[in-house]
Amino acid sequence: MSLLLPLLLIPLLYFLMIRPQQKKQRQWQQMLSSIKSGDRVTTAGGIRGTILAIKDDSYILRVAPDNLKIEVAKTAIAAVTTEEKSTS
């Protein structure tokens, strides 16, 4: 009976912690693979810019307002930013 509790706890931990993290990781990898030149992105550090070029392990971003070009690692991309057109 004392062995039953740990055996029930392992699947519970898998479904509550490990599986959602794996799903999030797969979505992030898919987002990185679908990035193309011209997309607006946000880095993990909070820098927002537009993709100018794609290298093997990094991206070249153009950052406003001075059109500064910076190179960031692919793993530093946190999100692809989509701007919705507002109807005024």
Image (spheres, rainbow, N blue to C red):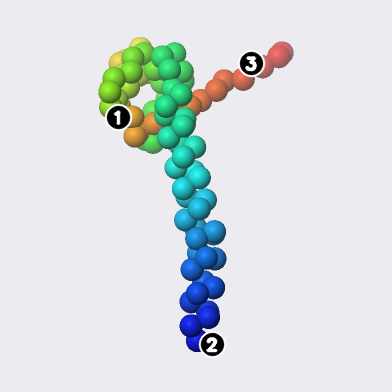
Q: Is residue 62 visible?
A: no
Q: Residue at x 53, y 80 (%)?
A: 4
- Label 3, on which residue? 85
> Marks 3/2: CA distance?
61 Å
Look at discs 3 and 1 and give the one toward the viewer.
1
| Residue 57 horizontal/vertical position (percent) | 28, 27
Q: Which mark is residue 56?
A: none
| Residue 65 horizontal/vertical position (percent) | 40, 14
- Label 2, on which residue? 1
Of marks 3 and 2, which one's residue comes earlier in the chain? 2
Against 85, is 31 above or below? below
Q: What element carries label 2?
A: loop
Asked whether 66 or 70 is in front, the reply is: 70
Asked whether 52 or 5 is in front, the reply is: 5
Look at discs 3 and 2 and give the one toward the viewer.
2
Which amino acid, mark 2?
A: Met
Asked whether 76 or 55 is in front, the reply is: 55
Image-based side of 56 in relation to 4, left or right: left
| Residue 51 horizontal/vertical position (percent) | 39, 17
Of marks 3 and 1, which one's residue comes earlier in the chain? 1
> Marks 1/2: CA distance?
51 Å
Q: Which mark is residue 73?
A: 1
Which amino acid, mark 3?
A: Lys
Q: Which residue is drawn at 46% across and 24% down?
A: 34
Dividing the picture into quarters, in which one does residue 16 lie? bottom right
Q: Which residue is drawn at 52% across and 79% down?
A: 5
* Label 2 crowd (10 A; few <14 / some 14-19 / many >=20): few
Which amino acid, mark 1?
A: Ala
| Residue 7 horizontal/vertical position (percent) | 50, 74
* Label 3 crowd (10 A; few <14 / some 14-19 / many >=20): few
Q: What element carries label 1?
A: strand
